[in-house]
Image (tube, helix red, strand yellow):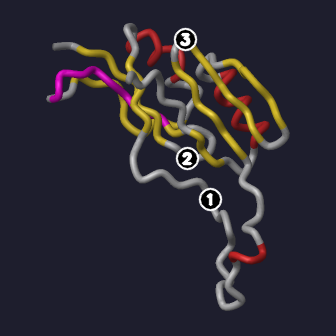
Amino acid sequence: MKLQKLSPILWTKDLKETISFYESVLGFSGKSHFPNFVTLTRDGIELMFIVPQDEPEDCKSPDNTEEFFPKPQLTGSIFIVTDQVDKLWDSVRDKASIKSPIEDREYLMRDFSILDNNGYELVFGQDIS
């Protein structure tokens, strides 16, 4: 048995803005569009985004006043390996919110990170071992 690929499904509040960010800043293209859902691809990378629907009524507690989906959350980052990290850095550094500028790291990667329009951290790195 072989695992073939990883395709995260991330939540977004604004699908049009997410599509625009990934297409114009990162060069992804929409592979499929359904109401409230899109698959975005570039080379071998695939990310899916969905606008979550309201929490089902039978799951709601009348005592819970917290909004079902206040903002996108991810407890880590999405790490994407590339073969030309400096070229990618040059193409995105003036178009995205920089979390960490490009640098050689102790773990033998040259990488940088940005925040997408939802606040998800995307790390792009190249092996320098």
Give the residue drawn at x 66%, y 25%: 40
- SS at mark 2 in the image: loop
* Identity, as a three-letter code, of the amino acid under mark 1: Lys
Q: Are marks 3 and 1 in contact (CB under 8 Å)?
A: no
**Which quadrant, please, contains the N terminus?**
top left
Name the residue carrying label 3.
43
Q: Which residue is mark 1?
A: 71
Amino acid bearing label 2: Gly
Q: Position of residue 34 (x, y in %)?
A: 82, 34
Q: Earlier in the sequence, mark 3 or mark 1?
A: 3
Secondary element type, mark 3: loop
Q: Which residue is mark 2?
A: 119
Give percent across and percent down for residue 23: 68, 22
Rendering coords of residue 95 (x, y %): 59, 27
- The answer for how far apart the CA atoms under marks 1 and 2 are is 9 Å
Q: Residue at x 80, y 29 (%)?
A: 33
Instruction: Give the mark, 3 or 2, whose residue is nearer the N terminus.
Output: 3
* Residue drawn at point x = 68 percent, y = 69 percent: 68
Residue 110 left/right relative to 24 = left
**Answer yes or no: do the residues labelled 3 and 2 have beta carbons within 8 Å?**
no
Is 108 included in the stretch rendered in magenta? yes
Left or right: 96 as drawn, with respect to 87: right
Q: What span is in magenta?
A: 107-114
